[in-house]
Image: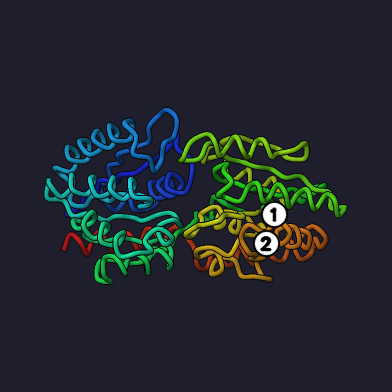
Amino acid sequence: MTIRVLLVGKGTPERGGIPTFLGTLLESDLVETYDVEFLNVAHAGTPQGGRASRGNLCRTASDALAVWRLSSDRDVVHIHSALAPLVTLLRAGILTLAARARGAPVVLHAHGGLIQLWLINPRRRAVARVALAGVGRVAAVSEGGRVALEEALGSRRVVTVHNGVDTEAFRPAAERHHPPRILYAGLLTPRKGVVDLIRASELLRDRGWHHELWLAGGTPDEGPAGEAEVQAAAGAGVRLLGPVPREAMPDLYRQVDMFCLPSWWEAAPLSILEAMASGLAVVATDVGDVPSMVADGETGFVVPLRDAEALADALGRLLGDAELCRTCGEAGRRRACAAFSSASTSHAIAALYEELVR
């Protein structure tokens, strides 16, 4: 019997880790093995992520009704959520209840690095236990997320499913660029460390390191204020690319020479894996699972968060040593292929489906 799966999450035109993850999943062999239906809960309008707004309440009610309706003939419902802050957690719980009301077991995929910073006290853990009581399995994408969720829900229901990247789609380019190009790809918001990166770029110019800084991304989940702050900080040496379609990302990575993700919090960022698969040296902050993804000094450098000086020092080492930049990129490509393939991710998810149906 073919297992029937309802996949629930924000796809295109949304940007960020969850839409990227879902896009990769929908192109994997998972859809050939199982009968997969995708409910895209992305909505138009100004983002209001994490807020108890009237718009979010109405959208949650509408999405829960859609989950309830579509779950009637599904064997598994697979819901994707950042799970934090509170409003996001409660929304995931409501969607879970809608699926369970139809008798479908639920896999809840916990994305985002905020969950391990948010689930820090007994009250919040108690709320998570109640809100997620109907979930069969919770898939954490990072070890920090797994530990935080196990403290709230117990170890029996929580597993780690590592993010993966399509290493055939993301491949290195042969050419290098003059001046070298540094890429950031993600939401444009200070919490992603983009203003820190702009400051680091200014420091590099002051030190005589000629380069181009490319910023790819758009409005963050919390709304346009963060994007406006980044745009205000961007000077003449910064190239703002705007939102880049997911299908255009492999080509974008081939147009640059190194990648930087200076976030204040993360789980296991897909953008780092994409950059590594594309043969780019990576500079990233010491958050979430980043230190286990980026081998410091081998595939790039891991630096303290909110430290523009440290960012400038690490990027300067790569700008000043083309051979080091090349060898870091090659090592990152090998590491991505060996440890972070999208095939491994889809196989781990398939095992969860089989377990729940049994």
Which residue is depicted at the point 20% across and 36% down? 65
Assign a secondary structure to mark 2: helix
Reading the image, the residue beneath label 1 is 258
Q: In which quarter of the image is residue 136?
A: bottom left
Reading the image, the residue beneath label 2 is 329
**How many numbered circles does the render carry?**
2
Dot 2, how many residues are within 10 Å of its Cα: few (below 14), some (14-19), or many (20+)? many
1 or 2: tag closer to the N-terminus: 1
What is the x, y in percent for residue 82?
39, 51
The three-letter amino acid code for the residue at tag 1 is Met
Specify whether 301 is left or right of 189: right
Which residue is depicted at the point 73% across and 62% down? 314
Work out how far the residue at label 1 is from the one at label 2, CA to CA, in angstroms.
Answer: 8 Å
Assign a secondary structure to mark 1: strand
What is the x, y in percent for residue 229?
61, 38
Specify whether 84 is left or right of 99: right
What is the x, y in percent for residue 344?
41, 63
Is the N terminus in the top left, top right, bottom left or bottom right quadrant? bottom left
Mark 1 or 2: the one toward you: 1
Which residue is depicted at the point 25% across and 66% down? 157
**Can see residue 244?**
no
The three-letter amino acid code for the residue at tag 2 is Gly
What is the x, y in percent for residue 356?
20, 61
